[in-house]
Image (cartoon, rainbow, N blue to C red):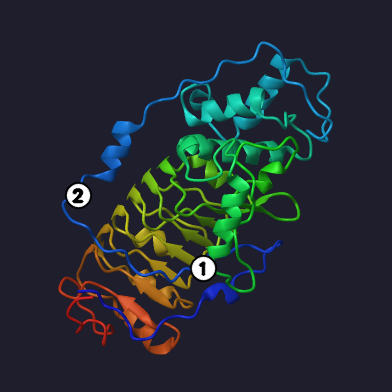
Amino acid sequence: IEAVAEEEIEEESEDAPEPTASPTISPTDEPDSPVIENQADPAEIIAENMVPVPPAPKPTSKPKKTTKASSIDCSDLSEDERADAIREQLSAITDLTVMDNDMSPQGRAYDWITYFDPAQLCPGGKNEHLLNQRYILATLYFSTRGDEWFTCYMSDPNCEMNSISVSEFRPVVGGVGGAQGSKAWLSGDEAGSECNWFGVDCNAGIYVQNLELPNNGLAGRLPNEITALPKLDILGLEENQLIGPIPNGWKDGLYRVRLQDNILSGPMPVFPPSMLSIELGNNRLSGPIGTAVTNLPNLKKLNLQENRFTGPIPASLGALTQIKEIRLHGNKFGGAVPGDVCVLRMHNFDFKKLSVDCKEVQCECCVPECPWNGR
C-alpha cells in the first residue's frame, strides 16, 4: 500500500544554487510509473541484442586541422606523438587497460577523438578540460549505443528540427526551459563545440554544466567517466534503457540527478553533500541505503520508490533537515520508520510527503498516508 500525502510539494528549483549559466531544469514531480508483471526482462533483451561494433580503421594520414580547432598549437607533434600525448592525458580519467581495448566504449572514444574528431584538439595546456570533457561525452555516446538514439545521434540530418520540437514541449521551470544544444553529437570543428550538442549545456568557462537526455533511446551502461565532469550540476537521463550500476565518485556541486524509469541495478551510490534532489524510482536497485543517505544536508527530494532496496529504514533520514519529500514504497524494507524521522516531520512543515509500504513497515507518522488502501 503506497503512502501518499495529501499535499503536493512546490518545485525546489527556486532553492537551487545560482548556476553560472541558465540551466534547463525539467519538471521533477512526475507520476509514478505502474509496475507491469510477466513481461520479458528488458535488461536481458538489451544484453542479447548488443553486438560489439568493431572500431573504424585508423586513417593513414593525419586529418587536416582547421584554424578553429584549438588555441593550443601542436603543429610540432607528429600523428603518433599527438596520439601518445592524448592517451597519457586521458589516462587520468580511464585506466589504460580499458582504453587500449578498441572494442570498449572508452577505446572507441579515444580513437574518435584522436583520429576522427573534426575539432582535432591538442593535448595539454590551460584548456585541457575541453579535450577531457569531449572524450567523456564521446564515451557516454558509445556506451549507450549513440548511433541508435532517437534524435541527434552522429550525423542526424534532422537534429536541429527535432531538438527545437523537444524544447517546445519541455515545460519552463524557474524562468528557464527547453533543450540546451541543438547540434548532433560528435560534431563541430571548434574547441568547446560539444557545448552545442543536443542536451548539453556549458557554463561561461566552457565546462559541461547540465546533461539532459530524457527518453532518447540511451541503452547500455553509465560509464564511470561521467563522474569526472568537474562542473556538472544536473544529470537527467530518465526514461531510457540504462542498465548496470550507477557509478560512484560524483563531484561536489552536483545537485540534481534524475535516473528514474530505467533498468539500473546494484546498490545506491554515494552522492555528494551538494545534492538537492535524487530521483531513482522505477529501477532495480537493491541492498540497504543507510550509508548512501548520511551526508546530504541540503537534500529536499529523495525518490527511491519501486526498486528492490532491503533492510531497515535508516535513522539518518532524520538528519535531512531540508527534506520535503521521501518516497520509499514498492521496496522490501522492514521494521519501523525511525523516531528521528517522525520527529523531523513533526517540526518541518515542508516535509509533506513520506510514503512506505505500510503492511511491511510500521509508521506512526505516515498518517493519513498509511490508512489508504491502494494507490
Left or right relative to 190: residue 149:
left
Within 10 Å of disc 2 (Cα), the crowding (few <14, some 14-19, many 20+) is few
Q: Amino acid at mark 1?
A: Leu
Residue at (28% x, 38% y) in the render: 45
Location of mark 2 (residue): 39
Q: Quadrant of the N terminus?
A: bottom left
Q: Amino acid at mark 2?
A: Gln
**Disc nearest the viewer among 1 and 2:** 2
Q: Earlier in the sequence, mark 1 or mark 2?
A: 2
Report if the CB atoms under discs 1 and 2 are less than 8 Å apart. Answer: no
Within 10 Å of disc 1 (Cα), the crowding (few <14, some 14-19, many 20+) is many
Residue at (61% x, 74% y) in the render: 174
Q: Which quarter of the picture shows residue 301?
A: bottom left
- Is residue 295 something one can see in this rendering? no
Marks 1 and 2 sit apart, C-alpha to C-alpha, by: 34 Å
Residue 299 vertical placement versus 216 (above, below): below
Left or right relative to 76: residue 249:
left
Q: Give coordinates of residue 42: x percent, y percent.
A: 28, 44
Q: Give coordinates of residue 163: x percent, y percent.
A: 58, 52
Left or right relative to 150: residue 316:
left
| Residue at disc 1, secondary structure | loop
